[in-house]
Image (cartoon, rainbow, N blue to C red):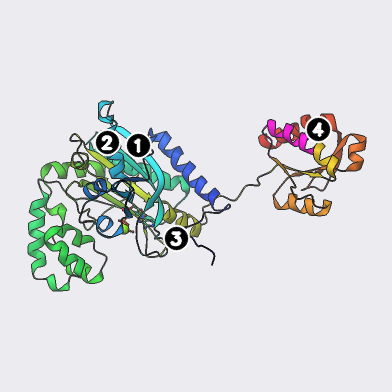
């Protein structure tokens, strides 16, 4: 039996890869304009990094990691996300010694053992940004507006940006107590996961997707009710900056991130029309994370965006660019001698960076012209026995159906002129 790709993974074939490249280029372009630099870290890390950096109580660490022992009996894990890796790299490479803040972005595959479904894969791709070494509210707003600008640039619509503040280690314990008190009489309605969260991490019950848990938390005290003055001022400033940047967002008190090192601002972006997996971006402030993984106390802010889901949204909204024809001209050589002469011509054209290709299967004139058409070539460069004898090249305009002859020795110059005219048109 033929071997198949692992469940939850995808082959990205030509035609689709160009869409990925377009998306990646747009992301890189916006990041460059905002002054963010790309970072690339390993595909796998010591398992402990994610246990500490993502958190033992999260779904990712509890259920979703690809963990294995290497031949040296070290526990390794394929990266399920990149914030922890970026923080590790920041500490390990002493980036805290450079002028702060450090503004980074990444694009790449992540791995989670999940139940594959539409918009949910085992190998998927994230684009993300991390700013390390600045705790100002303007950082939060800058990063969220980068996301906003990217979506604008892509032409994505029907999306909602939700923001909230989850407080900090000073004010969150107060909320935790209030929330537990509120939920005590409603415990029966909670799902198994949330019963488990009740003591360990009650905050997360607020964002459980189970309808019964959502019903049980209606009217529950939110983190916003208990924010300390520092957190409250910070949040007001973030909202003011976002307004100044023209970012339309909604304060959503149910939006939480459950771990101690997540502080203050949290945000998420949802898009309509792509089905149940509508979250395309999630992020927030994590002032305790770098210290958690053994670095100096360092504030951080970042997000991760699911690229498959963005592409799905661009697809349904018809916002993906049309495929451009790849070749400018197709060489149609007939017979072995003409092929050799043509091969030399093609190599000269390629030296001038003119996109040309030729038939590699030695087919008939008709078949070659058909192939030229299929590839979207503007011209066919025809070289048969007669042309070879007369030392000319027949150039056929495939759109207009016209053709003319040029001396073979002048062919490169002529075609280059035509190409430049096309490029500048
Ligand atoms: P979800 O609630 O959909 O499981 P999450 O909270 O696990 O999302 P994050 O860890 O915050 O997601 O990752 C950020 C983004 O990465 C998500 O908003 C989503 O767009 C994308 N993402 C997460 N898991 C997957 C997956 N298995 N397949 C495809 N995209 C994913
Ligand atoms: Mg998940």
Q: Is most of the magenta stretch helix, strand or loop? A: helix
Residue 133 in picture, x, y percent from top left: 24, 33
Range of residues picked out in magenta: 342-355
Q: How many marks can you see?
A: 4
Looking at the rendering, in which quadrant would you find the N terminus? bottom right
Q: Earlier in the sequence, mark 1 or mark 3?
A: 3
Label pair 2/4, CB-CB below 8 angstroms: no
Q: Residue at x 35, y 36 (%)?
A: 104
Q: Is residue 215 above or below residue 136?
A: below
Label pair 2/1, CB-CB below 8 angstroms: yes
Picture quadrant of residue 341:
top right
353 in the magenta segment: yes
Residue 296 in picture, x, y percent from top left: 19, 34
Q: Residue at x 7, y 63 (%)?
A: 181
Label pair 2/3, CB-CB below 8 angstroms: no
- Judged left or right of residue 131, residue 291 is left
Label pair 1/4, CB-CB below 8 angstroms: no
What whole-number distance in Å separates the C-alpha atoms at marks 1 and 4?
A: 48 Å
Q: Earlier in the sequence, mark 2 or mark 3?
A: 3
Residue 348 in picture, x, y percent from top left: 74, 31
- Residue occupied by mark 1: 104
What whole-number distance in Å separates the C-alpha atoms at marks 2 and 1?
A: 8 Å
- Judged left or right of residue 410, residue 298 is left
Crowding at dot 1, Cα within 10 Å, few <14 / some 14-19 / many 20+, comes out as some
Q: Secondary structure at mark 3?
A: loop
What's the mark number on residue 6? 3
- Residue occupied by mark 2: 132
Crowding at dot 2, Cα within 10 Å, few <14 / some 14-19 / many 20+, comes out as many
What's the mark number on residue 253? none
**Which of the pair 80/4 is nearer the observer?**
4
Q: Secondary structure at mark 2?
A: strand
- Judged left or right of residue 281, residue 316 is right
């Amino acid at each position: 039996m033929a071997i198949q790709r692992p469940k939850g993974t995808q082959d990205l074939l030509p035609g689709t890869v160009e869409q990925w490249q377009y998306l990646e280029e747009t992301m890189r372009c916006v990041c460059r304009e905002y002054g963010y630099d790309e970072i690339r870290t390993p595909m796998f890390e010591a398992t402990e990094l994610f246990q500490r950096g993502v958190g033992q109580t999260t779904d990712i660490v509890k259920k979703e990691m690809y963990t294995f022992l290497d031949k040296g009996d070290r526990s390794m894990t394929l990266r399920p996300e990149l914030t922890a890796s970026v923080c590790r790299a920041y500490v390990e490479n002493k980036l805290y010694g450079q002028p702060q803040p450090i503004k980074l972005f990444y694009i790449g595959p992540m791995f989670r053992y999940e139940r594959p479904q539409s918009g949910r894969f085992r190998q998927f791709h994230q684009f993300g940004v991390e700013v390390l070494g600045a705790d100002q509210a303007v950082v939060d707003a800058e990063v969220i507006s980068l996301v906003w600008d990217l979506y604008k640039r892509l032409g994505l619509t029907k999306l909602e940006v939700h923001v909230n503040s989850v407080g900090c280690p000073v004010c969150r314990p107060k909320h935790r107590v209030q929330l537990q008190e509120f939920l005590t009489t409603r415990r029966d309605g909670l799902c198994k996961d949330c019963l488990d969260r009740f003591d360990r991490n009650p905050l997360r019950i607020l964002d459980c997707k189970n309808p019964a848990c959502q019903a049980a938390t209606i009217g529950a005290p939110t983190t916003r009710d208990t924010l300390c003055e520092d957190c409250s001022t910070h949040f007001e400033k973030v909202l003011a900056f976002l307004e100044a940047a023209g970012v339309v967002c909604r304060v959503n008190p149910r939006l939480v991130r459950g771990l101690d090192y997540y502080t203050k601002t949290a945000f998420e972006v949802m898009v309509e029309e792509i089905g149940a997996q509508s979250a395309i971006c999630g992020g927030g402030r994590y002032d305790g994370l770098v210290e958690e993984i053994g670095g100096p106390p360092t504030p951080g802010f970042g997000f991760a965006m699911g690229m498959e889901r963005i592409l799905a949204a661009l697809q349904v909204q018809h916002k993906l660019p049309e495929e451009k024809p790849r070749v400018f001209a197709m060489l149609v050589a007939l017979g072995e001698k003409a092929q050799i002469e043509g091969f030399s011509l093609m190599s000269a054209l390629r030296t001038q960076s003119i996109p040309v290709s030729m038939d590699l299967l030695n087919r008939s004139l008709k078949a070659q012209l058909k192939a030229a058409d299929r590839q979207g070539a503007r011209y066919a460069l025809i070289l048969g026995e007669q042309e070879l004898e007369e030392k000319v090249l027949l150039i056929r305009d495939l759109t207009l159906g016209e053709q003319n002859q040029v001396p073979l020795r002048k062919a490169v110059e002529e075609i280059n002129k035509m190409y430049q005219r096309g490029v500048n048109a």
